[in-house]
């Protein structure tokens, strides 16, 4: 599939990932050699938005990991007490939202 959008610009693509975590943190680049493309090679162009999304998701993963570690320590020390009212409210809200989304999706078929 080829996307033609004059508003999109090329962005380096993350290099091949290695190791168990798969996070090298470095950006590689994709070949734009016309001879390679003509010979059936692959070429990828991504917009700058993809880099922004990757950075935001990476930052979210780090903060989530730190929060999980803190909760784990609190639980192990016997100091963690869940706010059952907040948990039940969140579960009901999520269920109602998912149910409403399914009804909307079902009515569009």
Image: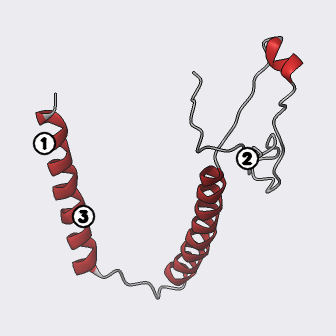
Q: Mark 2 or 1 closer to N-term?
A: 2
Quarter-of-image position of residue 109: top left
Q: Which mark is residue 36?
A: none
Number of residues whose C-alpha sits closer than 10 Å to that of mark 2, classed few (under 14), some (14–19) or many (20 or more): some
Q: Which mark is residue 103?
A: 1
As drawn, is 46 to the left or to the right of 60? right
Which residue corresponds to the image point at 59% horizontal and 64% vertical from the top-left?
56
User: Quarter of the image containing the N terminus?
Assistant: top right
Q: Does residue 19 lie above or below 65 as drawn?
A: above
Q: Which residue in the structure is indicated by mark 2?
A: 11
Of the residues tagged 2 and 3, which is closer to the observer?
2
Identify which residue, 105 or 44, lies in the foreground: 44
Number of residues whose C-alpha sits closer than 10 Å to that of mark 1, classed few (under 14), some (14–19) or many (20 or more): few
Quarter-of-image position of residue 96: bottom left
Pinpoint residue 78: horizontal percent, then vertical percent. 48, 85
As drawn, is 74 to the left or to the right of 87? right
Quarter-of-image position of residue 93: bottom left
Which residue corresponds to the image point at 75% horizontal and 27% vertical from the top-left?
43
Of the residues tagged 2 and 1, which is closer to the observer?
2
- Tag 2 and tag 1, C-beta contact below 8 Å: no
Pinpoint residue 7: horizontal percent, then vertical percent. 58, 45
Q: Mark 2 or 3 closer to N-term?
A: 2
Secondary-structure class at tag 1: helix
User: In 3D space, how far apart are the residues under numbered discs 2 and 3 (Cα atoms)?
Assistant: 39 Å
Number of residues whose C-alpha sits closer than 10 Å to that of mark 3, classed few (under 14), some (14–19) or many (20 or more): few
User: In 3D space, how far apart are the residues under numbered discs 3 and 1 (Cα atoms)?
Assistant: 18 Å
Pinpoint residue 40: horizontal percent, then vertical percent. 78, 12
């Amino acid at each position: 599939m080829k996307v033609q959008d004059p508003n999109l610009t090329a962005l380096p693509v993350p290099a091949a990932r290695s190791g168990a975590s798969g996070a090298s943190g470095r950006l590689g680049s994709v070949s734009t050699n016309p001879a390679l493309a003509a010979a059936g090679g692959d070429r990828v162009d991504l917009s700058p938005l993809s880099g922004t999304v990757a950075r935001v998701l990476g930052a979210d993963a780090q903060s989530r990991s730190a929060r999980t570690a803190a909760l784990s320590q609190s639980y192990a020390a016997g100091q963690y007490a869940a706010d059952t009212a907040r948990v039940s409210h969140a579960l009901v809200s999520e269920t109602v939202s998912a149910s409403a989304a399914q009804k909307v999706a079902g009515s569009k078929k």
